[in-house]
Image: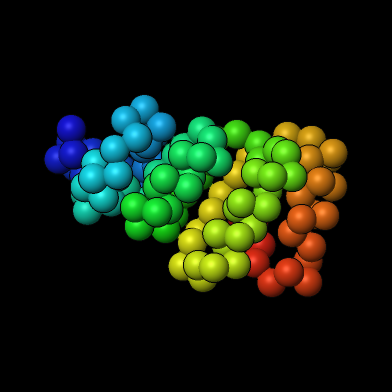
């Protein structure tokens, strides 16, 4: 599968972010990056913490980042690791307002 993914990326010039939440296997995450993955996609903040602790530095949260505790966990990871490139989904103006309280524009690190 890794070689197939690498050929697919090369042939179609795409960026793939495999679903790490399926396996939750950090060794596999690293192999996927070695074979051309652009990011790892995860479902929960806990999964983000596990991947980050394993050295993964480009992560997509395939959900909204909700709840002040979860937001503060991500903020701390971003504050402590300038290499972390974190993306999340937003599907409401309310969520934008909530995120703006935890990640104000003067914070310096933006959510992707």
Write the residue at 34% across / 52% down.
Answer: 54
Question: Front-most of 25 and 2?
Answer: 25
Relative depth, front residue between 38 and 52: 52
Q: Going 15% across and 40% down the picture, which residue do you hit?
A: 3
Count the labels in the image: 0
Quadrant of the drawing holding the N terminus: top left
Q: Position of residue 74 (x, y in %)?
A: 60, 53
Relative depth, front residue between 8 and 88: 88
- Residue 26 in view in this figure: yes
Going by the image, does 85 lie left or right of 99? Answer: left
Q: Residue 57 appears in which quarter of the rendering?
A: bottom left
Q: How is the image coloured?
A: rainbow
Q: Is residue 110 above or below residue 56?
A: below
What residue is shown at x 76% (from left), y 55% (from top)? 102
x 60%, y 34%: residue? 63
Percent of width and height locating residue 80? 54, 68
Q: Residue furthest top?
A: 22
Can the viewer see residue 8 in this picture?
A: no
Where is residue 51 drawn, in percent x and y? Answer: 40, 47
Q: Position of residue 90 (x, y in %)?
A: 70, 39
Answer with the quarter of the image where residue 24 lies: top left
Residue lying furthest front: 69
Quadrant including the C terminus: bottom right
Left or right? Give the position of 107 relative to 74.
right
Residue 5 relative to residue 80: left or right: left
């Amino acid at each position: 599968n890794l070689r197939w993914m690498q050929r697919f990326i090369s042939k179609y010039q795409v960026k793939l972010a495999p679903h790490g939440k399926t396996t939750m296997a950090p060794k596999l995450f690293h192999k996927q990056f070695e074979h051309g993955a652009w990011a790892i996609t995860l479902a929960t903040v806990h999964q983000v913490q596990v991947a980050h602790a394993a050295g993964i530095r480009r992560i997509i949260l395939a959900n909204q980042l909700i709840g002040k505790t979860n937001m503060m966990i991500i903020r701390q990871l971003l504050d402590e690791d300038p290499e972390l490139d974190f993306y999340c989904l937003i599907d409401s103006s309310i969520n934008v307002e909530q995120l703006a309280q935890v990640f104000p524009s003067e914070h310096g690190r933006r959510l992707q």
